Image (spheres, rainbow, N blue to C red):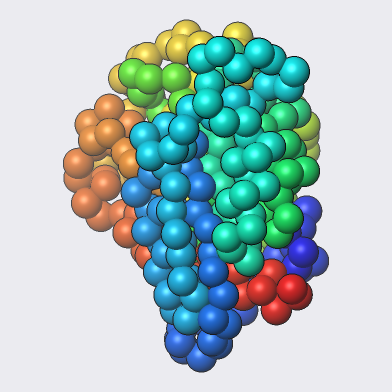
């Protein structure tokens, strides 16, 4: 693997999932003795720590820079007179990439300009200025390491609980008080499409349809209760409107995931990428009987297999 920006950097998704599960059984087997730089333009708990743990398991060292709190104020636009910013992205990334063998970055969307976000302008500049391979730790429109961890988790739990040939997975919008990115659902859809024995459905309120570049070929069931019927996994996530870009147009708590709704399913496992707001996105009783911590744990092995595949290619 040369870089990891999206599912398109993976030759065979199922093979990568199985390699990660194997690595989980023997996490200290590979020793790479390299340095991994972790750069965060936005907050994080899981991505930050699971990336460090993944690096440590591989015998690598890490350094972390939180751009908004630890560094000079970074200018990202080209040609501007830098009266209010202190360092340009070009030098900042150029320098940081001299201090590591692999650069992993988090670059959330502004949720103001759809085209700017969906063209992944910031991530593309970082790739251009970096002298080493780049890993996407969640960009404006994608969160591929989360999706890989989610598919590892589904693979582990389906073998314990499912006997059916095809799994029914429902990606459900859930309410939230803040405008959140579309990166987790976008990525989840594009990764799940690579797995033959999964049938994915999406349920969301009017005005919350995701970008059709991702959802083409996936059935939308507008009624959440109907969508939940006989599901094997429920993946809940809030996202802001794509149509009315970045806006919150609906906060109806009737879309919160409840115990009653979960009873419509085939004893489905509840999934969420975290962080999650209790009793807004999902009721306590559902979250307390979910596989969200398994997903979070698998962030380590998703990241570790990706770091390993890139480091083996350097
Ligand atoms: N799921 C996830 O990416 O969590 P963090 O934002 O805490 O890294």
**Residue 76 visible in this rendered orientation of the protein:** yes
Numbered disc total: 0
Q: Is residue 261 above or below residue 35?
A: above
Residue drawn where x is 63% and y is 44% of the image: 93
Q: Is residue 252 above or below residue 57?
A: above
User: Toward the viewer: 125 or 43?
Assistant: 125
| Residue at point 46%, 65% (across, down) | 62
> Is 161 placed above or below 292 here?
below
* Image quadrant where one finds the C terminus: bottom right
Q: Is residue 2 above or below residue 103?
A: below
Q: Nearer the viewer, residue 158 or 67?
A: 67
Please state the horizontal and vertical placement of residue 281, each as a whole percent of the image: 33, 31
Give the left or right position of residue 206, taking residue 69 as reference: right
Judged left or right of residue 67, residue 201 is right
Spot occupied by residue 31 in the image (x, y as percentages of width and height) = 54, 87
Quadrant (top left/top right/bottom left/bottom right) for the N terminus = bottom right
When asked about the image quadrant of residue 90, the answer is: top right
- At a point 68% along the width and 21% down the height, the residue shown is 77
Q: Where's residue 198, x and y in %? A: 64, 57
Quick one: 117 or 292, which is closer to the camera?
Answer: 117
Residue at x 44% of width, y 47% of height: 65
How far across and how far down the image is residue 95, in percent? 62, 49
């Amino acid at each position: 693997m040369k870089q990891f920006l999206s599912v398109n950097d993976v030759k065979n998704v199922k093979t990568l999932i199985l390699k990660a599960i194997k690595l989980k059984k023997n996490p200290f087997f590979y020793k790479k003795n390299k340095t991994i730089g972790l750069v965060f333009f936005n907050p994080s708990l899981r991505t930050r720590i699971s990336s460090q743990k993944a690096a440590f398991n591989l015998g690598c060292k890490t350094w972390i820079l939180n751009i908004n709190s630890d560094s000079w104020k970074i200018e990202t636009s080209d040609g501007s007179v830098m009266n209010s910013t202190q360092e340009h992205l070009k030098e900042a990334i150029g320098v940081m990439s001299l201090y590591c063998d692999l650069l992993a970055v988090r670059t959330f969307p502004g949720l103001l300009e759809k085209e700017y976000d969906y063209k992944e302008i910031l991530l593309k500049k970082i790739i251009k200025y970096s002298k080493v391979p780049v890993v996407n730790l969640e960009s404006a429109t994608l969160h591929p390491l989360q999706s890989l961890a989610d598919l590892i988790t589904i693979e582990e739990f389906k073998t314990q609980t499912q006997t059916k040939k095809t799994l029914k997975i429902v990606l459900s919008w859930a309410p939230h008080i803040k405008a959140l990115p579309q990166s987790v659902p976008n990525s989840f859809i594009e990764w799940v499409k690579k797995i033959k024995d999964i049938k994915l459905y999406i349920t969301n309120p009017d005005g919350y349809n995701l970008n059709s570049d991702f959802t083409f070929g996936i059935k939308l069931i507008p009624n959440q209760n109907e969508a939940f019927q006989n599901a094997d996994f429920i993946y809940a996530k809030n996202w802001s409107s794509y149509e009315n870009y970045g806006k919150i147009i609906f906060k109806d708590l009737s879309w919160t995931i409840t115990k009653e709704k979960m009873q419509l399913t085939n004893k489905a496992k509840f999934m969420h990428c975290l962080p999650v707001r209790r009793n807004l996105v999902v009721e306590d009783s559902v979250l307390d009987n979910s596989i969200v911590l398994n997903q979070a744990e698998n962030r380590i092995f998703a990241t570790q297999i990706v770091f390993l595949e890139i480091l083996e290619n350097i």
